Amino acid sequence: MTDKRDNQWVQRIEKRIEEKYPLCDIEWFYDKFNLDDFSEHKSKIEEQIMEIMDILCSNEKKYHFYIRVHKYKNWYVLRILVEKNISEELIDKIEGKLRKHKSSIIEIVYEKQCTIIKLTLS
């Protein structure tokens, strides 16, 4: 369930990614009622989504992403599932780029034929 402002935020990010990386396909999952104080964190989350996309999509391969944003206690959790196993080189680039955010916890997991990038922000 989302409201119009949340839809506009998602559409803006999708448009940025689509313009920059036309081979990327994204599906979004989030619950507006779980993100009550979300508005003050939108720009931070958007910045980190774009940083990840800049690394993953720079090789011009076609990727299918599932992006989920939700809140757990005082944390905002961003999960990006990539329908491919991505290389260790890309993983290292993602971790290096995101470690500059002191309030973030980064976890990258391989599961069968996919990679899950989990970023937790306070």
Image: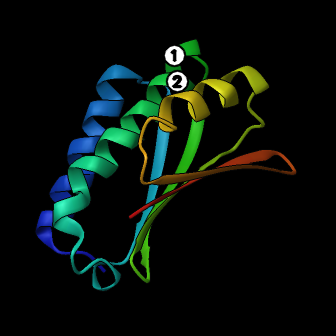
Q: Secondary structure at mark 2?
A: helix
Tell me which residue sits at (30%, 45%) in the image: 46
Mark identifier at residue 55? 2
Amino acid beneath label 2: Ile
* 85 relative to 44, above or below: above
Q: CA distance from mark 2 to mark 1?
A: 5 Å
Does 91 appear above or below 82? above
Q: Residue at x 68, y 31 (%)?
A: 91
Q: Residues within 10 Å of mark 2 (few under 14, many from 20)?
A: some
**What residue sits 39% from the left and 78% below the top?**
74
Looking at the picture, how far across and down is residue 78, in whole percent?
Answer: 47, 58
Q: Which element carries disc 1, helix, strand or loop? A: helix
Look at the picture and state if 15 lies above or below 105: above
Please state which of the two labelled residues, at mark 2 or mark 1, is closer to the viewer: 2
Characterize the local packing of mark 1: few (<14), some (14-19) or many (20 or more) Cα atoms within 10 angstroms. few
Name, please, the residue furthest toward the top: 59
Marks 2/1 in contact by CB < 8 Å: the verdict is yes
- What residue is disc 1 on? 58
